[in-house]
Image (cartoon, coloured by chain):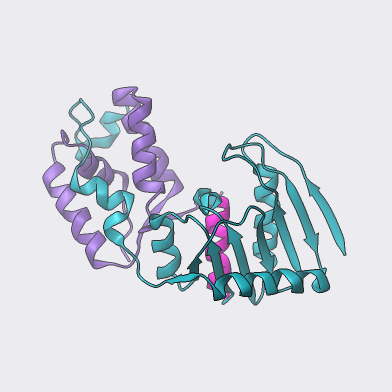
Chain colours: A purple, B cyan
């Protein structure tokens, strides 16, 4: 089962990312192909941190959080201490 | 028999702790009577439900207004979901002997109150009967609709952050 790193989320979910088309295509294909996609709470955190560091846009952060954490396709795994 | 009053807390964390403990204690079956299933959005409860499914616990849910994106994940993991008329008092019942009761409240985070009843099989039987009565008149949800998932929706029309990023060099993005 694929494990999604931060860069695929940033690429797919920012129209202005340098690898947007590639990231969007890959994530779309993964969504359609696999029953579940895995990420971790750290990955979610890092994705939101990148977005916040670059934009300071709280609405965007909320939107991205809903896209990732609100998706039932993504299994967010808890990183052990 | 144990009865614990659940007082309100800013993000319903006391309520969620009781629910999580009850889910983690379940060995055979969990029954849920709810509205939107909004609490399932909290990762602590979502993870507890997944742990229960992994150890073979059967989960059946009655809800009045469940969100499709939540239904998708629950159906795909083997839960049974029924949709029917609104019920004001909400319950999670574990193994037909213990339950958490969420009292009616406006849809605002932090005001939820209720009770946790541990090991009261006689009273739990009545709730199980109520659940069975409700699902007998409810509509079973059978199909996940992944085109209503938030990530899928985002992929159809990705946001514009207003700034360029380079996802191949994220360490530089964080400087």
- Residue pictured at 56% horizontal, 72% vertical: B135
Residue B99 position in % (x across, y down): 73, 62
Report the residue that reaches farthest toward the right: B1
- B141 or A81, nearer to the observer: B141
Residue A15 position in % (x across, y down): 16, 36
Quarter location, residue B123 = bottom right
- B14 or A25, nearer to the observer: B14
Magenta residues: mostly which secondary structure? helix
Question: Left or right of B13: which side holds B141?
Answer: left
Span of residues in magenta: B44-55
Q: Is residue B133 visible?
A: yes
Residue B171 position in % (x across, y down): 29, 34
Question: Left or right of A22: which side holds B68?
Answer: right
Quadrant assignment for the C terminus of chain B = top left
Compared with B27, A19 (above or below) is above
Q: Is residue A75 visible?
A: no
Q: Magenta includes B48?
A: yes
Q: Magenta includes B40?
A: no
Quarter location, residue A47 = top left
Compared with A74, A8 (above or below) is above
How many marks are shown on the rendered structure? 0
- Residue pictured at 19% horizontal, 43% vertical: B157
Report the residue that reaches farthest toward the top: A56
Quadrant assignment for the N terminus of chain B = bottom right
Residue B23 position in % (x across, y down): 65, 63
- Residue pictured at 34% horizontal, 45% vertical: A67
Compared with A3, B162 (above or below) is above
């Amino acid at each position: 089962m694929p494990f999604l790193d931060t860069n695929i989320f940033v690429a797919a979910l920012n129209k202005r990312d340098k690898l947007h088309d590639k990231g969007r295509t890959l994530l779309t294909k993964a969504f359609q192909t696999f029953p579940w996609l895995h990420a971790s709470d750290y990955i979610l955190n890092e994705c939101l941190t990148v977005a916040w560091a670059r934009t300071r846009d709280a609405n965007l952060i909320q939107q991205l959080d809903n896209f990732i954490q609100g998706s039932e396709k993504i299994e967010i795994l808890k990183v052990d201490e | 028999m144990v009865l614990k009053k659940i007082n309100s807390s800013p993000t319903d964390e006391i309520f969620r702790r009781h629910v999580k403990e009850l889910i983690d204690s379940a060995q055979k079956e969990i029954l849920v009577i709810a509205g939107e299933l909004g609490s399932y959005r909290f990762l602590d409860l979502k993870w507890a439900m997944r742990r229960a499914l992994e150890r073979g616990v059967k989960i059946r849910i009655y809800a009045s207004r469940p969100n499709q994106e939540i239904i998708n994940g629950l159906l795909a993991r083997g839960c049974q979901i029924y949709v029917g008329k609104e019920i004001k008092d909400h319950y999670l019942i574990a193994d037909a002997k213990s339950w958490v009761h969420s009292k009616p409240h406006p849809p605002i985070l932090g005001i939820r109150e209720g009770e946790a009843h541990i090991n009261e099989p006689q009273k739990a039987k009545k709730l199980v009967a109520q659940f069975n009565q409700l699902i007998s008149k409810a509509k079973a949800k059978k199909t996940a609709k992944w085109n209503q998932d938030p990530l899928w929706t985002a992929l159809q029309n990705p946001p514009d952050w207003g700034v360029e990023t380079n996802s191949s060099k994220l360490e530089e993005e964080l400087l």
